[in-house]
Image (cartoon, rainbow, N blue to C red):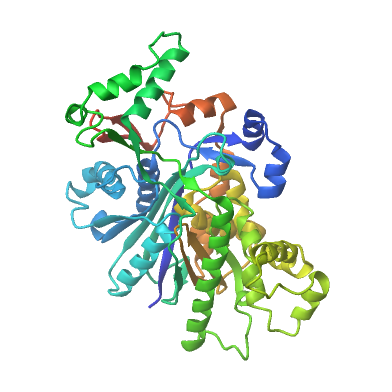
Amino acid sequence: MSVGIDDIAVHIPRLVLDMAEFAALRGLDAGKLRGGLGLHAMAMPDVHEDPATMGANAVSRLIERNELDPRSIGRIYLGTESALDGAKPTATYILEMLIERFAPVYGDDCFAHCDVVDLTFACIGAVDALHNTLDWVRGDSERVGIVVYADSARYDRGSTGEYTQGAGGGALLVRHNPRLLAIDDLWGVCTTPVHDFFKPRRKMAADRLFADVLRLAESVGAELPEDLVSRMVAALPDSELSDSELFHDQGSSVSVHRDTPVFDGPLSNRCYVRAVRSAFGQFRERAITTGRLDPSADPVLTEQWRRIVVHLPYAYQGKRMFPDLFRVDRSALDSWSDVEAEIGPAPTDHTAAAFEAQEEAYRRALSKSQAYRAFAKSRLERGERASSLVGNQYTGSIFLALLSTLESDLEEGTDLSGARIGFCAYGSGAKAKVFEGEVQPGWRDVVGSVGLFERLRERVSISGAIYEQLHRGQLAGSIAEPEREFALDTVEEDGERRYRWVG
């Protein structure tokens, strides 16, 4: 029996910021953001939304649509890089909400034997959760698992990542004889520890903290002695600082954690390309070893993929990064001479100081070639459509691209039954996974019940001023009141989060 994705549910925040509104707010060229990166709008979480509610809403929808008995669900694995706690999995918050929703019908212990956990590896965490759950489901024909992804991609105001922001959640039903996508146990993996994007636990010294507070006091007209900070720090030994609630046994520094990342965009692009290229190479080798691929009969693997779905931190990232795989998969063919006649040969001197710059220049040239543009239009473009309207979903971006692709084909009347879809996943830090799935005969019914683009058309537009308040966390009440969804109710003084179902 085959194993794979039987159904998919999504939760997209109801608030949306048009890129023209954002561009005006930051003094940017909206035309360049649209034409250069494919950015048209970004999804924004409302006050009552967080990664737990987005994930819970998607799972709830999946359970209801498939009339699942919660007692039959063996695991709910969450991929996220927006965890709400350093110890307690965000998946347990999701489970707590699901129990509230379904206990009246199935009993208070309806999820008591469901295994839950968070998997974190930047944007590839949900693919890791899928990989793990597929292996688990293969072990027993009765097993049913759910993979959840939920993230809020939030960057510092004014940073080069801010215009790629987005948010959302989703859930994948994994079981035998799937109606949507069958996935073989054939994967290519590449892991290389790098620091292209991370969210570190930082320390702030007491004198710096005091200086910031006093600077703010002066900004509102308070007159303070110039040496007040040094006098305060000198007068407070570590023992007294440790007794304060703020420092709490941390000496003369305080721990600071921010949801916004430290990142290096150009480095991350290079890591993306290298990791995916390496994982693709391993996938191709294993495909040949297992007999999945016959290099003498069908040497070009990417031509066998009717559609290709990749991680999209912004809509056009995929077609900008994929030229390397396009070249690797075709450079040994006689027909590659036609490409070289158009753009010239690729750089070959790996020892040259300018090799990376030459590689990047060649990648850009290849992306503009006739052969590549036709390839990208056929295989990658449909996945960009939803990303352009949502923004980065971190762990969910690749599955948003999948649904965008399938719903676009459904609307266009394309028959994808039996077609193979290639997946190229990436997570900063860095890891890539390459795998493939076969579209099943029931895919139309599954995709037709989701209504992704309809949901996107029904969102509530917000102004740049409202966006600023949301980003700063200055709003106490929701912009669009929740209805038939889970909502964040309160956050207790000790940080404990409370949720409720709004009928």
* Quadrant location, the C terminus: top left
* Residue placed furthest toward the bottom: 296
Q: Position of residue 343 (x, y in %)?
A: 79, 69
Total numbered circles: 0
330 up-or-down from 159: above or below: below
324 up-or-down from 300: above or below: above
241 up-or-down from 458: above or below: above
Name the quadrant containing residue 474.
top left
11 up-or-down from 295: above or below: above
Residue 28 horizontal side relative to residue 399, left or right: right
Q: Position of residue 193 (x, y in %)?
A: 43, 62
* Residue placed furthest toward the right: 341
* Quadrant location, the N terminus: bottom left
The residue closer to the viewer here, 244 or 149, is 244
The residue closer to the viewer here, 52 or 425, is 425
* Residue drawn at (68%, 75%) of the image: 348
Q: Position of residue 280 (x, y in %)?
A: 53, 73
Residue 479 horizontal side relative to residue 359, left or right: left
Residue 60 horizontal side relative to residue 369, left or right: left
Name the quadrant containing residue 47.
top left
* Residue drawn at (54%, 49%) of the image: 452
Residue 463 seen in render? no
Residue 228 seen in render? yes
The residue closer to the viewer here, 333 or 265, is 265
Q: Position of residue 111 (x, y in %)?
A: 22, 52
The residue closer to the viewer here, 11 or 266, is 266
